[in-house]
Every structure is written in structure tokens, then in C-alpha cells.
Image (spheres, rainbow, N blue to C red):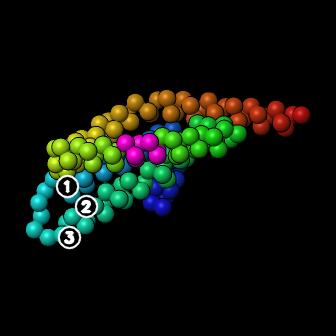
């Protein structure tokens, strides 16, 4: 839910770059909360609950951002197929690989090390990598909008 509100706000503030910026910020926020929640030994469970809640909130932002991003660059007639592939293949394989990999690596290296490398460092790398998305995302949104405008004009002239 928060992702949808943040996405709407970001798209209004910066139609070309807002969604990418929120997605990137969510990755960095997740990494910070993951570091604090998995790498520091607290005397109480309360900080763990807080940081794991923040991790969940940061992760929960993603669907409200990445789904509109997919729709913004995919023609309407291909959106069903795009979501079917994205959700049932890429997300499912990603979560399965993460879960299995973290479990196996946790047995070998310990969960604290695995959490540092996967939940913190990999998310920081992912957030940095998303910087490369700004230019092509804006270009792809413009291309699709031009195509939809052309279709609309053609339909109105027929």
C-alpha cells in the first residue's frame, strides 16, 4: 500500500524519474534496516522487531513501484504476458534461488555472514545498479507514450 502512495507521489513529482528513485531508495532503506537488524546484537527483541518491520516495509514498497513501471513501458496488449513472465518466472525463480542459496550458504558460513552479504551488500549493489535504469526507463516510457498517442490519433481519424 505504501508503495502505491509513494509511487503516485513520485510519478507526479517527476514523471520521468520518480518511480526509479523510489525503487532505488527502497533498496537502500532495506539494506540499512537489514544491517541494523542482522549485524548488531541488541539486548532486547524490540530493536530487532523494529528493524525487521522496516525491512518488510521497504520490501513492501517494491510491488507498488515495479508494477507501474512495467505497465509504463509495455503496450497494453502485452501487459498480461509481461506480468505472467515477470511474476511467475523471474520473481519466483529469484525468491527460490535466494531462499535455497541463503539456506545452503548459511549452513556453510553462518546466517550472520550470509545476511551481511545478501541482505545488505547485495541490496546496496542492487540500489547502485538501479542508477543505470534512469535514462532507459524514461526513454522507454516516452516511446510507449508516443506509440499510444499515435494509435489514439489514428483511431480518432478513422
Residue 105 on image: x %, y %: 23, 43
Mark 2, Cα crowd under 10 Å, few <14 / some 14-19 / many 20+, is some
Mark 1, Cα crowd under 10 Å, few <14 / some 14-19 / many 20+, is many
- Are the residues flagged by discs 1 and 2 in contact, CB closer than 8 Å? yes
Dot 1 corresponds to which residue? 38
| Span highlighted in magenta in the image | 91-97
Which mark's residue is nearer the viewer, 3 or 1? 1
Residue 82 on image: x %, y %: 59, 40
As measured in the structure, the alpha-carbon distance from the residue carrying label 3 to the one carrying label 1 is 13 Å
- In the picture, measured across the screen, residue 142 lies left or right of residue 77, that is left
Which mark's residue is nearer the viewer, 1 or 2? 1
- Are the residues flagged by discs 3 and 2 in contact, CB closer than 8 Å? no
Quarter of the image with the C terminus in it:
top right
| Residue at 51%, 41% in the rendered image | 89
Q: Is the magenta stretch mostly helix, strand or loop?
A: helix
As measured in the structure, the alpha-carbon distance from the residue carrying label 1 to the one carrying label 2 is 9 Å
Of mark 3 and mark 1, the one earlier in the sequence is: 1
Of mark 3 and mark 2, the one earlier in the sequence is: 3
Dot 2 corresponds to which residue? 51
Mark 2: secondary structure: helix
Amino acid at each position: 500500500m505504501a508503495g502505491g502512495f509513494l509511487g503516485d507521489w513520485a510519478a507526479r513529482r517527476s514523471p520521468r524519474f520518480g518511480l526509479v528513485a523510489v525503487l532505488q531508495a527502497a533498496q537502500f532503506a532495506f539494506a540499512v534496516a537489514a544491517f541494523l537488524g542482522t549485524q548488531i546484537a541488541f539486548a532486547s527483541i524490540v530493536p530487532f522487531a523494529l528493524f525487521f518491520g522496516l525491512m518488510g516495509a521497504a520490501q513492501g514498497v517494491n510491488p507498488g513501484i515495479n508494477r507501474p513501471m512495467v505497465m509504463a513501458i509495455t503496450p497494453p496488449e502485452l501487459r498480461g504476458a509481461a506480468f505472467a513472465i515477470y511474476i511467475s518466472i523471474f520473481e519466483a525463480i529469484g525468491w527460490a534461488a535466494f531462499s535455497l542459496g541463503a539456506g545452503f550458504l548459511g549452513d556453510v558460513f553462518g546466517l550472520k555472514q550470509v545476511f551481511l552479504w545478501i541482505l545488505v551488500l547485495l541490496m546496496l549493489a542492487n540500489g547502485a545498479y538501479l542508477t543505470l535504469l534512469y535514462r532507459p526507463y524514461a526513454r522507454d516510457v516516452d516511446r510507449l507514450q508516443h506509440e499510444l498517442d499515435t494509435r489514439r490519433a489514428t483511431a480518432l481519424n478513422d
